Amino acid sequence: MMLPGLAISSARRMVAATVALALCMGSSAQAADKVRLILDWAWLPYHAAFLYARDRGYFTEAGLDVTIEQGRGSATSALMLAHGDFDLGHINITNAAQAIGKGLPLKTVAVYQHKTAAAFIGIKGKVKLTDAQSLKGLRVGSTPGGSDQFSLQVFSAVTKVEPSDMKIVSLNADAKNTALLTGTVDVISGDAPAFEAQVKAAGMEPEVLSIGDLGVPLIGFGFVANKAFLDKNGAAIPKFLRAARHGFADMAADPKAACEYMRVKVDALTPEQSCLIYLAGMARLSTPPTDPSWGHQTDEEWTKLVGALRAIGQIPDGMEPSAFYTHEFEP
Amino acid sequence: MTVETETAGDARENHAQKKGAPESGASLGSIGTSLGWPMLSAILGIGLWEFLVRYFHVPIYLLPAPSAIVLEIQQHWSLLMRELAVTVGAAALGFAISFLIGIPLGCAIVLSSVVERMVHPWLIVIAAVPKVVIAPLFLVWFGFGLKSEVLFIVTFTFFTLIVNTIVGLKSPEPELLQTVQAMGATRLQILRKVSFPSALPNIFAGAKIALTFAPVGAVVAEFVASNSGIGHLLVIAVGSMQTALAFAAVTIFSLFGILLWYGAEQLEKLVLPWHASQRGNVQQK
Amino acid sequence: MNSSGSASSGFEGASVSLTDVRKVFVSGKSAVEALLPVTIDIKAGETTAIVGPSGCGKSTILKIIAGIEKPTSGSVVLRPEQAKRQPAGIVFQRDFLLEWRDVIANVILPAEIQKLDLTAARERAHELVRELGLGGFERKLPWQLSGGMRQRVAIARAMLTRPPLMLLDEPFSALDAMTRDQMNELLQHVQQTEATTYLLITHSIAEAVYMSDRVFVMSGRPGQVLDQVEVDFPRPRSLAIRETPEFSTIARRIRLQLERPRAQAA
């Protein structure tokens, strides 16, 4: 940083140079990459991974300054991500694909839950859910406009069991538990880990039919990036993912501690039993964090997903799977 | 002189007539009667609720007993207070903004028919759009937190305030305004000295309603667009089937609302002792 | 006692000359002739009454003089010139007091509006309130007063700035007969100290004759002047004069005038 046109004594020049050098060094040491993360929902047990990564210094070690904001549904989070309010989103990848299909400037950078959590949940003894056909004639609680309406569509396309074969009952997301437990509906459509925990907490046994087991190629959780962030600071993403993975590993190693941590840190109020069941359910669907392929996507799963979504008209014909994801930033 | 008799006697008589039948008992007695019946009714209601829940073994995730709710309030007192403070703060800010825009705008509308015709359609729009639809939009436009929340509260409370202000400002009879006009008053003087004081009962009515709407608006906004406050707490509580806690939050919130309403009524009594609404009616014995 | 308002001492009030004043009310396609051309002379310092049946346009005349209505044709001349600068004091049948102000605050309203000295105005207000028999009620709010008392406050308010013209439009019609009599006597007394020109609109013949120096008798709609009667009793007048033969004669003359058109119609 020379000061052109001014006559300075050599001593002064030395001072100027030293100061300049110190500033440059200082700023690069402080140049922690800012990453704004948005979650899929308000605090839930599996978010402990991110709190660990933040509070145990995994992010800072990786040179990242990460802020975490709770979300209100993967679809909304995708929208805000696309807006530029956030850089990375931990969201449901099926929702992300739908959003990208609509033209939002996002790209999926990692997937750690290759099977969707979407399922039909009933109460053992009251229903028997052996296969897709067993849903015929049952009252099914589903949230209109939510992601389960949409998983229902793909389910029908694959299994040929149509919505008209069932009695679909529209329910607000919060009302689904109560409706199931009081018998207003026979079965609800939703995420298995959450509802398993809730049915058990009510003292009953859940009967679960995972649509992932029926050959429905929907994908669960992963990470999506805002395209502009990718271009500007893509190098931060694998660092982030590795730090997050560490957090996930800690969570998997001691779920009980994770539940306690959430309770203490953010007043997450899920009772311990339910929290453990929830975490176990999520773990079952996810790649173990200790696996080196954690977060890696396969071209095959994307082709299948895009195909399924295209079949129900959620993705326009022109778009190739490669528009939806990239391997470039996997951990 | 006959005139003298009319003044004192008449006044006392009329005063008594207007006040209605004289109240029996000391002031303490009347407080007893005014609080007694509502309290008894509340105790009976809550008692019945507790009994029914226990008798029918209603599960706690469905309908918690009052005792369970009280326990939750005790257990999570600081959490509840903290979140309530957030909600109340946002509500206060939103209400204040609504008030500070609504009253002057109401005056402007009454003073100028051009302003009225231009602003009127927008008021209808604000009133007609279901607020539930607006909150998610605000989230996407303004993000999580106070900005979305406060803006939402403003849309939630604005209409009441401004409509009541306008009705109040237009309430003086034309002949009253003519009388004051004949004294030489300008439009602005009429607004300040007649229309505005005349409007205070209506403005207060609107403000009381808006005051109770504001925290509700805050909670509605928080369901969707904030990660703190009672609304956010409810999202988490309902999501983890912590029905008792959800009820506890709602209870605390409602108690706050009741206190707020009573506070507003007391303030109204202070400011508007002259208005018929504050003078009470003939009491039944 | 010359605090606010009056132009010069010895000022007795304005005179008002209405010449061929006509009023037609137009609403949409229909036109109502309220006043046939009337010519009325209100003399300075006098109390003039206009008496007539309901709807004869007497209130309209008052409103035209007050400037609240404009005549369709004809002229209204106020003398002297400076009288035009000061608004008349007006009292309607309803008191139109401001409910949130106490008695004194109501009375000083005209001074506030005309931006006059408020300390002087308050002093004068206290005087007027006492004169009108409301001493002790200065801090009361209107709802705490009887109808007669409220109307007295309205009168005090109208008198505050010593207007050159006091216009009273059926000021006592809403009161019961006994209160009305008391108010007549009181106002008549007060006029001794608050000398100015008074115009009283009324449908009570007795009130018109008792209160005024001159009575204009008007017919029903469309209004026209039927007669003009001078009333010569010395002031101050007690209510007892209403039982004198002279009073009855005048009252009878007016009554007959008012009854005639009806008889004709029948």
Image (spheres, coloured by chain):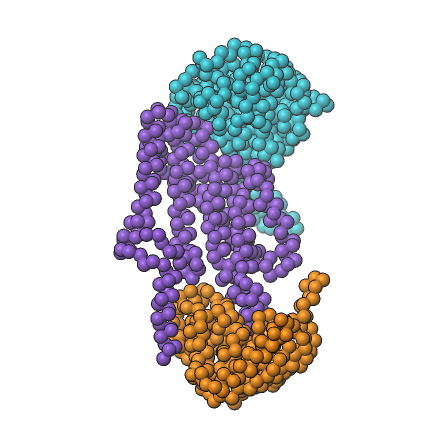
Chain colours: A cyan, B purple, C orange
**Is C105 situated above or below C78?**
above
**Is A85 situated above or below C98?**
above
Report the number of numbered marks.
Answer: 0
Say which residue appears at 42% left-offset and 64% top-offset: C143
Camera sees residue C15: yes
**Is C99 situated above or below A168?**
below
Task: Say left or right for A193 vs B178.
Answer: left
Camera sees residue A24: no
The image shows residue A144 at horizontal and vertical percentages of 57, 27
Say which residue appears at 44% left-offset and 70% top-offset: C176
Say which residue appears at 35% left-offset and 71% top-offset: B9
Q: Nearer the viewer, residue B145 or C144?
A: C144
Snapshot quadrant of residue A105: top right
The image shows residue C20 at horizontal and vertical percentages of 68, 79
Task: Say left or right for B20 vs B158.
Answer: left
Q: Nearer the viewer, residue B52 or C239?
A: C239
Q: In what quadrant of the picture does the N terminus of chain B appear?
A: bottom left
Snapshot quadrant of residue A320: top right
The image shows residue B258 at horizontal and vertical percentages of 40, 45
Residue lying farthest top?
Answer: A130
Say which residue appears at 48% left-offset and 73% top-offset: C172
Residue lying farthest front?
Answer: C266
Q: Nearer the viewer, residue A58 or C251?
A: C251
The image shows residue B137 at horizontal and vertical percentages of 59, 38
**Is B218 situated above or below B114?**
above
